[in-house]
Amino acid sequence: MPPKYAQLVQALQRRIESGTYSPGSLLPSEHQLIQEFGVSRPTVVAALRVLREQGWIESQQGKGRFVRGRPAMSSVEQNRTGQAYLTNPETDAPGEVIEAGAVAVPNRVAALLEVEPKSRAFLRRRLIVRDGEPSELVSVWLPLELSEGSDLTSGEALAQGLRQHLQARKGVRFDHVVEQITARMPTVGEVKQFGMPKNVPLLAVFGAVRDASGCPLVVVEVLLPADRHELEDAYPIG
């Protein structure tokens, strides 16, 4: 079953598509949604964030959130799994930094960064909690020189997205992401971190960020327990 915030996203999308919430209308407040759906405030906040990112709603300062309607296909197409972890501030997702420092890179990450296996790179890893349980393990890998002079060594959540932070501090320009999705069984450590059954697989999403010349800049690895997530994509048929 999808997590509570994803279920709320789907429920609100159905209401928008059916016309219950028509384009231009004011969306119910956070308090109203909490009362109606019987969920926590973090669940409502997470669902509204997803709807805003996907283009279903928009926020107007001092007025509230307004319905835009079902987004155009081009907008939905841009909503890739790894994109939010590159653009959204870490403070948007509750969790904790569990590792930040130089480590030896595993083979897959080394290939995506185009460095020698077991060479050292900087790793920032956060465990994100949604609906009161560990939901995602997000690891950001980048060359050591790119981490120098940044706030990635901090144990505090970043108030900027990774893309904005590195652009401001290091002058790098993210151009495109090559994304790979695999599935595997969790390690003993991951079973403990997620508090998940050892026989449930993990979905592993790898996003290799490159500049305009194709040079690798960053690799984002997102681990998702398969019983707590479902991945959805949309694309035009040519």
Image (cartoon, rainbow, N blue to C red):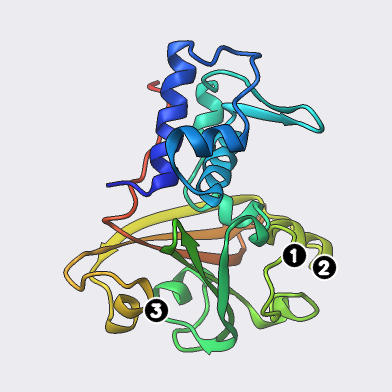
Which residue occupies 45% across, 26% down?
13
At 51% across and 20% down in the image, what residue appears?
Answer: 70
Q: Which comes before the other along the chain, label 3 or label 2?
A: 3
Q: Residue 73, percent across and down? A: 50, 23
Q: Is residue 208 above or below residue 43?
A: below
Identify residue type, mark 3.
Asn
Q: Residue furthest front?
A: 35
Tell me the tag on residue 107: 3
Q: Nearer the viewer, residue 13 or 217?
A: 13
Q: Earlier in the sequence, mark 3 or mark 1?
A: 3
- Which residue is disc 1 drawn over? 166
Asked if labels 1 and 2 touch by Cβ distance under 8 angstroms, the answer is yes
Query: Farthest residue toward the left?
Result: 199
Question: Taking 126 as reference, is 29 left or right?
Answer: right
Circle 2 packing at 10 Å, graded few (<14), some (14-19), many (20+), is some
What is the CA distance from the residue labelled 2 to the residue labelled 1? 5 Å
Spatial CA span between label 3 and label 1: 24 Å
- Camera-side mark, 3 or 2: 2
| Amino acid marked by disc 2 | Arg
| Left or right of 100, for residue 15 | left
Q: Residue type at mark 1: give it.
A: Leu
